[in-house]
Amino acid sequence: RKVISHIFGRNKRRTIGVPNFVWIYYCRKHYQRARYRTGEWPFRQCDLAIDTIKNMRAWGGVEDFNLQLRRRETQRSTGNEGQFEEDDSTVQSTGHETGESIATHDADANEEDSSAEAAVKDGRGFNPDEPGESSEPKKRSSRIIPRPVPDWLYSRIGNHKTFSQTLQVLRDLRQHLQ
């Protein structure tokens, strides 16, 4: 499993050309141990992102970076949380007729991730089969406290960031998390 490729965007068109030796991999077992059994995961993600960017610099195939917030953070900061964006409401699935339901697993996966994040933040282990956990989509738990994006980070968002600028943002973010 590519441990932190999601940090570099989910757009495969942009990351498909990055060779495998640049990415850091964990097997499923060790990823789950690192992710769900310790509260150190946010710090480890920062360290892994720094190492991956250093690998990209050594490889030489990346010129610069576009730093942006996750879509849900952008929506939260603009007050549009939970609402569809104009583009999202017009997306159609290939082979899907209007009026048919589409089975998705994203809601379940996101809910499981949210529960896992809450468990780690609370210092507990995470077991998706615990009583009280259902497989049907539901609203986020009120235990999960949204963390506002720090003001200093807004000033660093933008296109064409150098390796040094990107690494400094990650170091500052790691320091902010402590």
Image (cartoon, rainbow, N blue to C red):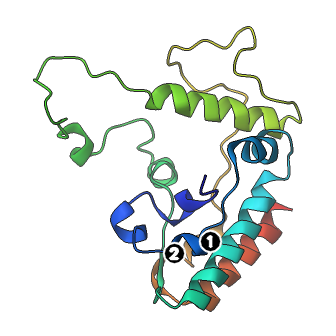
Q: Which mark is residue 157?
A: 2
| Occupied quadrant, residue 13 | bottom left
Q: Residues within 10 Å of mark 2 (few under 14, many from 20)?
A: some
Where 24 sits versus 53, above or below? above
Where 10 sits versus 128, above or below? below
Where residue 72 sits in the image (x, y, percent)?
Answer: 48, 48
Query: Label 2 vs label 1: CA separation?
Result: 7 Å
Residue corresponding to mark 1: 153
Q: Are marks 2 and 1 in contact (CB under 8 Å)?
A: yes
Q: Secondary structure at mark 1?
A: helix
Residue type pointed to by label 2: Ile
Could you tell me which quadrant the C terminus lies in? Answer: bottom right
Q: Residue at x 68, y 29 (%)?
A: 115
- Left-right relation of 118 to 11: right
Query: Observer-nearest residue: 120 or 93?
Result: 93
Query: Observer-nearest residue: 89 or 25?
Result: 25
- Left-right relation of 169 to 161: right
Q: Residue at x 81, y 42 (%)?
A: 33
Query: Observer-nearest residue: 1 or 44?
Result: 1
Task: State the count of labels.
Answer: 2
Where residue 23 sits in the image (x, y, percent)?
Answer: 60, 68
